Image (cartoon, rainbow, N blue to C red):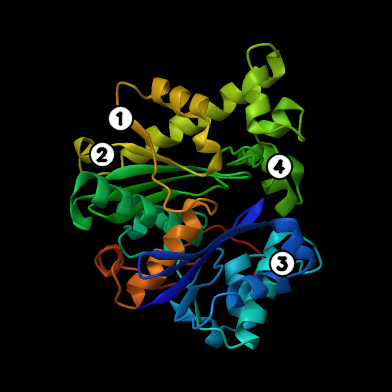
Amino acid sequence: MYRVIGIDPGSKSWDFFGLENKEIILDTSIPSNELIEEPSKALAIIKSVENIDLIVAPSGFGLPLKRVSDITEEDIFLTLLKFDTKEKNKLIGLGEILRLIKAEKIPGIIIPGVKHLLTIPRYRKVNKIDMGTADKLCTAVTGIRDQVERLKINPKSTNFIMVEIGYGFTSVLAIENGQVIDGIGGSNIMGLRACGSLDGELAYLIKNINKKDIYSGGLFFISGHLDFTLKDIILLAKKDAQIKLAFDAYLSELTKAIHAISSSYSNKDKIAEILLAGRSSELQYIKETISNCLEDLFPVKLMKSYGNISKHAAQGAAFIANGLLGGEFEPIISNIKIKEAKGSILDDIYIPFDKHNY
């Protein structure tokens, strides 16, 4: 009997999902802003479940598997990739919570990000950092479980494109034979808030790019309505030209990303479907619009959720914890080769940058 917890440190909320084998023992969410102000709240949620065998701690950009008890400040930097520790945002909250978990001696583990996986050819990693944060890997695991159970196949037969539409970022991953073979991280695709890849000349004009630039310029910023929800945007897109421009720009970027990552498969015919994840994907209009854009290529489905409150990433994190302990999900976790992950998120970067703070 394994008691595990998975954590998803999202842009808008942190989600916690706990299992005792396959039985749900924790399923909750808390606004990210609350944890920034009071990181101890995360600890209180974790400690509400007794006798935990393992938690998958919030891992950011990830590390090759490492127990939280062994992490250093350098490790925390590599999960955050943030130099200015005085700037208040969710990443700093993540670092503080890792320190608390370590101090309390809670059995936790940091998991890899997508770039650490050896199932991705090295040449696809050149000059890339964000191929998908650790929570995106967790979401992929939930998608693999979905296909295994729904299609009654083994993990090595799962094949799909994962599209996760989060509050800030959108990410696309390629899963072939139950393994992640490529990824386009949230800082490389326009999101609801994030700008996505920056034009090189625009980056030059901005000069001093920081995290807030990466988190801005997306759909909500283009629409001119930062306080809107995606549902608001959808309702007004047919009436407001600027909102329609924002929505069309977002869909264009997403469609191109899906087409691009489909080229990474050994054979496009292996792609069974696109699985949509993230709370924003649950809006019927989003699913229908993406389906219409790709109707000649792949069927589009919503990824199954195994909880009532937490997002797919927190659920997948719990499945990973279970699998690492040898539980029910061990075949999925063994096949995805999380244990074999290695290297640094900064490997194979050939563009000079200032490493004096690293």
Residue nearest the observer in this picture, 111 or 107: 107
Residue at mark 4 to residue at mark 3: CA–CA distance: 18 Å
Circle number at residue 218: none
Foreground: disc 2 or disc 4: 2
Do the residues under discs 2 and 3 have CB atoms within 8 angstroms? no
Amino acid identity at mark 4:
Ser
Q: State the quadrant of the C terminus.
A: bottom right
Q: Quadrant of residue 191?
A: top right
Does dot 3 land on a helix, a strand or a loop? helix
Q: Kindly identify which residue carries mark 4.
A: 216
Amino acid identity at mark 2:
Ile
Amino acid identity at mark 3:
Ile
Circle number at residue 298: 1
Residue drawn at the location 66% of the way across and 80% of the way down: 99
| Residue 332 visible in rendering | yes
Residue nearest the observer in this picture, 189 or 148: 148
Residue drawn at the location 35% of the way across and 37% of the way down: 274
Q: Answer with mark 2 or mark 4, whichever residue precedes in sequence.
A: 4
| Residue 357 visible in rendering | no
Q: Neighbour class for label 4 at 10 Å: few (<14), some, many (≥20)?
A: many
Q: Position of residue 49 (x, y in %)?
A: 54, 75
Foreground: disc 4 or disc 1: 1
Q: Quadrant of residue 96?
A: bottom right
Circle number at residue 92: 3
Q: Answer with mark 4 or mark 1, whichever residue precedes in sequence.
A: 4
Q: Answer with mark 2 or mark 3, whichever residue precedes in sequence.
A: 3
Residue drawn at the location 75% of the way across and 43% of the way down: 206
